[in-house]
Structure formats: structure tokens, C-alpha cells
Amino acid sequence: MELLKLDIKRIILTLVIINFYNTSMAQTKGVIIDIETLSPIPFVSIHTKGLNIRGTIGNEYGEYSINFKYDTVYFSHINYELLPLTKHSKCDTIFMTPIVHIMPDVVITVQNNKWIEKLLKQFVKEKSKNYHTEDQILNYSFDIKSLSDSSGYAFSSNGYLISPEYSKKEGYLICPITNLIKYKDKTAGKDFMQLRRSLYNNFIKDFDYGFIKKHIFSLTEYNCTLNKNLLKFSFKSKKGEENEGYIIIDTLKNVIIEFEQVSGTNYNINSNTSSLARFVGEKKGFRYTVWKTLIRGKYSLFDNSYHLAECRYQLFRQNEYKRGKGLFFTNIESVLNISRLNMKSDILRDNVWLKLPNPYSISIIVSKETRLAEEALERTPAKYELF
């Protein structure tokens, strides 16, 4: 009888332990919603902080699932305020507050009209006269956060930037004054690649006659009380590729002052990788399953010409290794702000300027010039903080 009682106690204790374990490891599931529009927010980063960072990401429908232990987890998105959630919170719907307010579309009024095409072609014809007409020394501040399935990383850089004249072959020059790396230790380097993407892939460069030909443009009405000369056009790829967005154009000055571009997997793979890189990757069992980007930028008049003033960038990329044996994701969010520099007299003379080479996503061969420029950027001093 005593043995039977002891066995029953052991069974009960085992059941209690199993129940506790299952409860502590139970998934937190739900959906992430914009508190103003009540629409789902895609690809939200969800992560802990500290040395052993854990993370996941919401899907394109705003749905999320957390299957790791946490005391506090953080919901992060480039366009929304950082939102903490404790393990004691009992909610499956997460509301995030936007920090970027998109001008609401009201109705599509005109599509594929000849005057739209004429206006856009006139913009292309005159953009070299309106953008980067001379070298400009400007202030810059850059922040990037990166979350993968295995780690978290953040990098910020502030300093001076030379935005080159449109017709020059030379690219951007940079003078970093402060660099800050947030990581679990001091092994991480400086991430200037995304800064390079924000500057060189700045939409205006790619907005040419070919871009106009490949996309459908529609005039979109929206509330604009500050400037009656502004028109907003949405665009979408004619081929069915996921490449769409909008532009806001000042018809009086014939300049694009704001844009947004959302690109899907096939478009990004074809635009950012070479056929050789794809062939080598596939031979090794590597392929991209998801590659989504959102880029939003604004241009401002600095002295006599327009330059990029703000760029917000989000990338979500998921790759598969050896046919499903490994599935990994990376989510990158970055913000670049550029502003006018008031005191320029001693900047060029008293500071060391470094080349900012053109960016690349996947490349089999990197030129010696690019490699040396990247090494020089990596040698710039930086402070470290635990992420």
C-alpha cells in the first residue's frame, strides 16, 4: 500500500512538472494591428534584449507566434514606436502606434492618361537639372537594427556627407564622427552597407523612361493643404511582379519630393543578384524563399538642388538551405536623415573623407577598390554597448 501511495505521488508530481513546462513554453500567438488604421502590420520584429537574444518575426499578414521564454519581449517596426510586452500580458492583439503618418488615399481618378506619361517623361528629362546639380556637404545620421533567427544587432553613425554632383562618376564621400555598435559582444563590425543602399539606390536614379514604360501609373487624390501643386501617383508593375508604390511630385518645380516602393521576392532576386550568384547558390542548396523590401524617401532643396533628406528602409529575407533542412530569416530596419550643414569652411580641410562604394547584395567577386574602401570604413573608431 505504501508503495502504491508513493507511485501515485510520483505520477502526480510528474504531471505537475509536465503541466508547468507546457505552460511556460506555451506559444504566445496573435496579430499586430495599426492603432490608427486598424490594419495588420507586416514583418514586425519581435525580440528580447540582453546577451542571449531570442527573436522571431510576424508574417506579411501581421500574425505572430512566440515560442521561446521571455520576461519582456519587444515589438519593433521601422514605422512604429517600440512596444514592450511582458510575460504577464494576456492579449493576443497587439496595437502599435505609427511614427510615420501616410497621407490617406481617397480615390483613383485617372489611369494611364497621356498627360500623366508626358508629365513623368518631362521629369526624367529635367532631373539632372534639379537633383545634385553641385557637390553638397551635409550632415547625416544613420540608424539600423537587424534581427535574425540567431542574433540581434544595432548600429548608428553620425557625421558629414558629400553628396556628389549628378554627372560625376565619383560617388559619395563620408566622414563618420561617431559610431556606436550594439551587440552581445565586441566582435561585430560596422554596417555601412545599408547606408550605401539608402544613398545609391535612392529611386530617382532608377526612375527613367524604362521605369515609366514598365509600370502603370494612376492619379490618386489625397488631402494636401500645404501645397496645391502636389500630385500623388501610385504605380504598379505591368508584368505582374510585386513592385509597386507611389510618388508625390511638385508639378510647379517638376520634382519628386517623396516616394514609396514595395518590392517582392522575384523582383528583388532578379534586381539584386547575378545569374552566376544564383547558379552557385542553388548548386550548394541555397535559395531565397522570401525577399521583401519597403523603401520610403523624401527629397529636400539644399541650396540650389534637391538631395535625399530621409530614407526609411525595411528588408525581410528568408532563405532555405539544403531543401528545407535549414530555414533562416533576416529583418533589417534602417533610417537615414540628411540635413543642411551651416558651417562648411573647415570641414573639408580638418577631416578625413572616405569613399562610400556602391552597394551589392550578393556578389561572387568584389573589386579591389571596393574591398579597400570597405576596409577603410571598418577601421573608423566605434563604441560598443550590449544590445
Image (cartoon, helix red, strand yellow):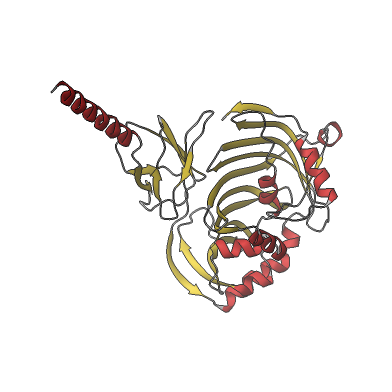
In the visual, does 197 lie left or right of 375? Answer: left
Query: Which residue is painted at 57% across and 42% down in the image?
Result: 146
User: The C terminus lies in which quarter of the figure?
Assistant: top right
> Residue 342 location, x and y as percent?
73, 36
Give x and y (percent) for residue 91: 30, 40
Q: Quadrant of residue 185?
A: top right
Which residue: 72% across, 63% down? 276
- Above or below, 271 relative to 91: below
Which of the 4 quarters of the picture holds residue 281? bottom right
* Residue 45 visible at all: no
Count of numbered marks: 0
Q: Which residue is found at the position 67% from the left and 35% from the top?
A: 157
**307 shown above or below 339:** below
Quadrant location of the N terminus in the rendered image: top left
Residue 103 lies, with reference to residue 337, above or below; the image says below
Q: Is residue 372 left or right of residue 360?
A: right
324 and 160: which is toward the camera: 324
Q: Which residue is farthest right?
A: 349
Residue pictured at 82% horizontal, 38% vertical: 353
Residue 386: where, in percent of width, then height? 58, 27
Whether residue 38 appears in this view of the structure is: yes
Quarter-wise, where is residue 376 in the image? top right
Q: Nearer the viewer, residue 150 or 252?
A: 150
